[in-house]
Amino acid sequence: MARLPGGGASGTLQALVAEAHAQQGDIARRITDAMDSNRRRPAVQSKPRSYAVPNDLSEMLAERHPLRTLSDLVLPQATKAEIEEFIHEYSEIELLRAHGLEPRHKIMLVGPPGTGKTSLAEVFARELRLPFFSVRYDGLITSYLGETASKLRKLTDFVATQPCVVFFDEFDTLGKERGDKQETGEIKRVVSSLLLQLDALPTNCVVVCATNHPELLDRAVWRRFELRIEMPLPGSEEIAQWFERLRKDYGSDISNLEQNFISALSGRSFSDIESFTLDVRRKVVLARGKLTANQALLNGFAKLKPQQPALGEVYHSQTAYRADPPKRDRAKSNKGKAKVHPSEATLI
């Protein structure tokens, strides 16, 4: 630091003050530049946000940390395309709102058990980087008059306060047809309350519901869902994709077993196939080189129990479901007949 000429101690002090002001100005400019840079940089979250579930809701709502990504699932191409379209649509929510539009946010997943409905609900939360809440019916549904509807209102009031994905598995438990004479008046009140709550939820709350029995759903509930995705049992193409994942790890040792793999696992659910392949991998690892992947697969094929096709075949015999099924005949002569949505149009 140079001493100002002719100023003595006073000149030195003035120089110190001037230098301090200059440094403060430089720091201020750096802070301003950093703030401007942050404003221009799009916000990217490394993981889904998390919100603590209040104590009074903990019995009926659980936060789960989604682990599945879309690439983890093996799905028909048409189904995967619909999922990708929804994720893109919701990711552009600000663009849509700038044009007076809102994204779809109520999704119904329909399919037999084990076809990936719960996993897909997790995928939506993971891909959209939103907290994932799963509804617990054991804490939501009670035998006391009006209490279930009251709890449902508290639950939806909470999830409506922040962006999130809320998952209702086995949704037919809540959304049953109100014309079913076997159901009590309390269930009918719950369905009416549910309709009001679904309508009131904002678009920042993505509602994902799953059912194995779409024929049981109330027609008014069914119409609330803007996106309906069918989750079928895997076909030969999807089973072959599972085999390809194994082949990437074990190479030519199992290449000759592709058709055996497809034949042995045909008609089974994704959950069954995943369990089978994980079991093969475990046996190969635990054998410490004494068992090849080829032999592990052959042993697994031999131990597979005969497939129980009833649920999957019954499900697929009901080919498709309309979003707006007709009114059901209340006549006593129809009592006991199966209630199915007609197959006039495909679900998705």
Image: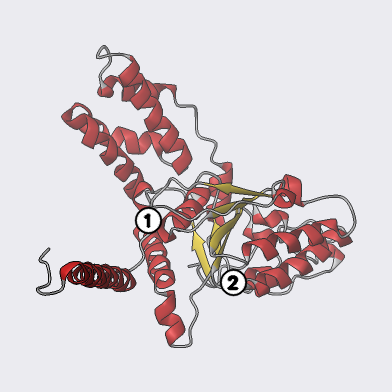
Relative to residue 203, is residue 334 drawn left or right? right
Residue lying at 32% horizontally and 49% vertically, measured from the top left: 237
> Where does label 2 land, which residue?
323
Toward which corner of the image does residue 146 lie, by quadrant? Answer: bottom right
Q: Give the image location of residue 14, x and y in percent.
A: 22, 72
Residue 65: tell me if it is visible: yes
Nearest the viewer among 160 and 112 is 160
Point out the residue furthest to the bottom here.
Answer: 99
Q: Amino acid at mark 1?
A: Pro
169 relative to 303, above or below: below
Label 1: which secondary element: loop
In the picture, measured across the screen, residue 337 lies left or right of residue 132, that is right
> Going from the N terminus, do you reach mark 1 or mark 2 first?
1
Amino acid type for the residue under numbered disc 2? Ala
Label pair 1/2, CB-CB below 8 angstroms: no
**What residue is shown with label 1?**
76
Q: For residue 169, say whether it is visible.
A: no
Q: Does 294 sit left or right of 196 as displayed?
A: left
Q: Residues within 10 Å of mark 2 (few under 14, many from 20)?
A: many
Of the pair 15 and 53, the residue shown nearer to us: 15
Q: What x and y, as percent, mark residue 190?
A: 79, 62
Q: Secondary structure at mark 2?
A: loop
Binning the other alpha carbons within 10 Å of mark 1 as few (below 14), some (14 to 19) or many (20 upward) gives: some
**Residue at (68% x, 74% y) in the render:** 326
Distance in Å between CA atoms under marks 1 and 2: 21 Å
**Is residue 104 positioned above or below 124 on the image?**
below
Image point 39% across, 58% down: which residue? 45
